[in-house]
Structure formats: structure tokens, C-alpha cells
Amino acid sequence: MRAKREMIDRLLKTARGQLDGLLKMVEEDRYCIDISNQLMATESILRKANREVLKAHVEHCLKEAFASEDPLVEQAKMAEVNEILDKLAK
């Protein structure tokens, strides 16, 4: 992975901390809206991490695939991107 490793690491560790906090909130039977707000914050961090990973993929892996001028490599990389876009659109 060629994404900014420190940033991705920090984002994922933050999300993990938030998940731990969420589990504690559920165990403590905290107010549902507070739990929901925390869930949305965690989702936002995970989306940001995914965005950074995908940007790195486009900037490096796709660039290299097109520079190779191998149609099979290009097609495979484009299929990967289309597949992930389909998943994101759900």
C-alpha cells in the first residue's frame, strides 16, 4: 500500500478507539442518540481512511498500469476500480 501510512494508521487507530468507546457505551446502556452520533463519527473516520487508500491506488497503481501499456493490466486495474465503485455506491 502506498497511501500515507502514518495518516492511515492514525485514522484506523482512532476508529478502533471509538469502537472500543462504543462497546462501552452499549454495555453502560447509554442514550441511543449518543451511541448513534458516535457510530456516525466512526463511520466518517473509516470513510476518510478508505478515501486516502483509494486515492493512493489511483495515483500509483493505476498510473503504473497505464504506463505499462499492457491492455490486460489496464483492464484488470479498471475492473478493480469499477468493482470498488460498485461497492461504494451501495
Image: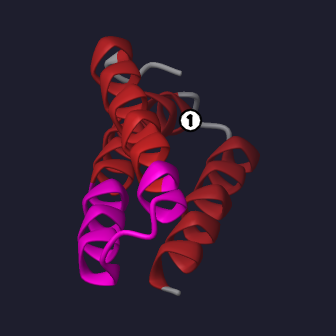
Q: In the image, which residues are magenta?
A: 23-44
Q: Nearer the viewer, residue 61 or 10?
A: 10
- Residue 39: quarter of image: bottom left
Q: Nearer the viewer, residue 72 or 83?
A: 83
Q: Which residue is mark 1?
A: 65
- In the rendered structure, the answer to whether residue 6 lies left or right of residue 83 reads left
Q: Position of residue 21 (x, y in %)?
A: 40, 45
- The image's colouring method is secondary structure
Q: Residue at x 34, y 81 (%)?
A: 32
Q: Nearer the viewer, residue 47 or 89?
A: 47
Q: Residue furthest toward the front?
A: 28
Q: Position of residue 14 (x, y in %)?
A: 33, 32
Residue 17: say if magenta.
Answer: no
- Residue 27: quarter of image: bottom right
Q: Nearer the viewer, residue 17 or 7?
A: 17
- Residue 5: quarter of image: top left
Q: Secondary structure at mark 1?
A: helix
Q: Position of residue 28 (x, y in %)?
A: 45, 60
21 lies above or below 67: below
Q: Residue at x 30, y 77 (%)?
A: 31
Please name the amino acid that badge 1 sits on. Ala
Tally of numbered discs: 1
Residue 42: say if magenta.
Answer: yes
Q: Position of residue 68 (x, y in %)?
A: 58, 28
Local packing at callout 1 (Cα closer than 10 Å; few below 14, some 14-19, many 20+) is some
Q: Residue at x 63, y 49 (%)?
A: 77
Q: Residue furthest toward the bottom?
A: 90
